[in-house]
C-alpha cells in the first residue's frame, strides 16, 4: 500500500478528513521550501503537494504563477526539487505529491523522471494539462516506479469520461471545484454534490476537492462532500508575503474546520 493510501486509511479510521497543502517547489529557495514542507506537516497537513515551476503554468492563477516565475529565475530545476524531496524524506514520512506540467517530465524522459522521483521519495504525481487520451505512456512508467498518478476531474466532465478517468486513477481523485485556474474564490457555485456523487459511483478511491479553497469556512462547507481538501493559493499568498507563521495557522484552522461537521 502506498503512503498516500496508507494515510487515507489512517485518517478514515480516525474519522478525519485529509488536508493537502500545496507549495511551489523552490520558492523562495529549495532550502526554505523543504523546511516549509516539514513545518506544514507539523501544523497538521496530511499530504504535501509540491509544484514543479514551469514557464507556462496554464492551470495556475497569479499567486502561484508569481512564485513559479521567481523560483525559475532563481535557477530551480526538476533535479533540484527531487534532491529537496530526498532531504525531506529523510526526516518525514508524510506523503509527497509532485504537481508538474508535462513538458518537464517529457524533457527528462518518462521512465527516468518516474524512476528518479520514486528514488527521491515521491509518492504521487499530478499532471494538470495531460489529457486522458494521451496519458497511457506516463501511467505505465509511473506504475513501474510505484508512483500514484492522481487524475483531475473537471466540473464539465460527463459520466462516461469520469468513469474512464477513474478507471486508471491511483492514490486519490482530485475534484476540481471550478472551471478555470487556481486561486481563492469568494464563492464556489459549482454543483459539487452532483459531481462528487458521480465520481463516487465510478471509484472507491478517496476524493479530494481543490481549486478555490482559501479559508476554513469554505473548507468546512466542502468537507461533507469529500475525503479531503487542497489549499494552495491562499498558502502561497502568505508565503510570498513572508507570513510563514500565518501560513501554518491557516493549515491548523482548515484542518480543524474540516473535522468539525
Image (tube, helix red, strand yellow):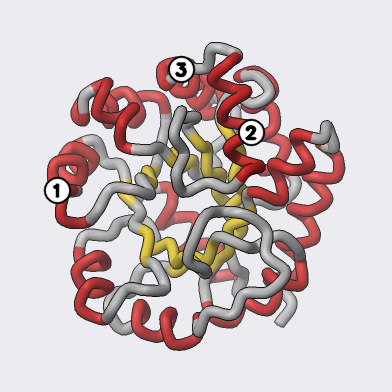
Q: Residue at x 59, y 22 (%)?
A: 71
Distance from disc 3 to disc 1, alpha carbons, whole Å, reads 25 Å
Q: Nearer the viewer, mark 3 or mark 2?
A: 2
Whichever of labels 1 and 2 marks the residue nearer the N terminus, that label is 2
In terms of depth relative to the viewer, which is nearer, 208 or 62? 62
Q: Indicate left or right for 117 with 67 as reference.
A: left
Instruction: Find residue 180 and report its horizontal and vertical position in percent.
Output: 49, 60
Position of residue 130 relative to residue 103, above or below, is below
**Helix, strand or loop for disc 3:** loop
Instruction: Find residue 148 and report its horizontal and vertical position in percent.
Output: 32, 48
Position of residue 148 relative to residue 83, above or below, is below
- According to the picture, the residue beneath numbered tag 2 turns out to be 66
- According to the picture, the residue beneath numbered tag 1 turns out to be 136
Position of residue 52 relative to residue 62, above or below, is above
In terms of depth relative to the viewer, which is nearer, 261 or 183? 183
Place residue 247 in its image quadrant. Answer: top right
Tell me the crowding category of disc 2: few under 14, some 14 to 19, or many 20 or more residues within 10 angstroms, Cα based. Answer: some
Q: Which mark is residue 194?
A: none
**Helix, strand or loop for disc 2:** helix
Q: Indicate left or right for 146 with 96 as reference.
A: left
Callouts 3 and 2 close, C-beta under 8 Å: no
Instruction: Find residue 15 and report its horizontal and vertical position in percent.
Output: 60, 74
Callouts 3 and 1 close, C-beta under 8 Å: no
**Helix, strand or loop for disc 1:** helix
Distance from disc 3 to disc 2, alpha carbons, whole Å, reads 16 Å
Distance from disc 1 to disc 2, alpha carbons, whole Å, reads 31 Å
Q: Residue at x 75, y 36 (%)?
A: 239
Q: Nearer the viewer, mark 1 or mark 2?
A: 2
Q: Indicate left or right for 249 with 10 as reference.
A: right
Tell me the crowding category of disc 1: few under 14, some 14 to 19, or many 20 or more residues within 10 angstroms, Cα based. Answer: few
- According to the picture, the residue beneath numbered tag 3 turns out to be 77
Q: Residue at x 21, y 24 (%)?
A: 109
Amino acid at each position: 500500500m502506498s503512503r498516500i493510501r496508507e494515510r487515507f486509511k489512517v485518517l478514515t479510521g480516525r474519522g478525519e478528513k485529509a488536508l493537502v497543502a500545496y507549495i511551489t517547489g523552490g520558492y523562495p529557495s529549495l532550502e526554505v521550501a523543504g523546511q516549509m514542507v516539514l513545518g506544514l506537516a507539523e501544523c497538521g497537513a496530511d499530504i504535501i503537494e509540491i509544484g514543479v515551476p514551469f514557464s507556462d503554468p496554464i492551470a495556475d492563477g497569479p499567486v502561484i504563477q508569481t512564485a513559479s516565475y521567481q523560483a525559475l529565475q532563481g535557477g530551480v530545476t526538476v533535479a533540484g526539487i527531487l534532491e529537496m524531496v530526498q532531504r525531506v524524506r529523510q526526516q518525514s514520512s508524510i506523503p509527497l505529491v509532485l504537481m508538474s506540467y508535462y513538458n518537464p517530465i517529457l524533457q527528462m524522459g518518462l521512465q527516468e523522471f518516474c524512476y528518479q522521483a520514486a528514488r527521491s521519495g515521491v509518492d504521487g504525481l499530478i499532471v494538470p494539462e495531460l489529457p486522458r487520451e494521451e496519458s497511457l505512456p506516463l501511467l505505465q512508467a509511473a506504475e513501474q516506479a510505484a508512483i500514484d498518478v492522481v487524475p483531475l476531474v473537471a466540473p464539465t466532465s460527463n459520466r462516461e469520461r469520469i468513469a474512464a478517468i477513474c478507471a486508471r486513477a491511483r492514490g486519490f481523485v482530485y475534484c476540481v471545484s471550478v472551471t478555470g485556474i487556481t486561486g481563492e474564490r469568494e464563492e464556489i457555485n459549482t454543483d459539487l454534490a452532483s459531481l462528487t456523487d458521480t465520481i463516487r459511483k465510478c471509484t472507491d478511491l478517496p476524493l479530494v476537492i481543490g481549486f478555490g479553497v482559501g479559508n476554513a469556512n469554505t473548507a468546512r462547507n466542502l468537507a461533507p462532500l469529500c475525503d479531503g481538501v487542497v489549499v494552495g493559493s491562499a498558502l502561497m499568498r502568505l508565503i510570498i508575503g513572508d507570513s510563514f507563521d500565518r501560513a501554518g495557522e491557516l493549515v491548523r484552522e482548515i484542518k480543524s474546520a474540516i473535522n468539525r461537521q
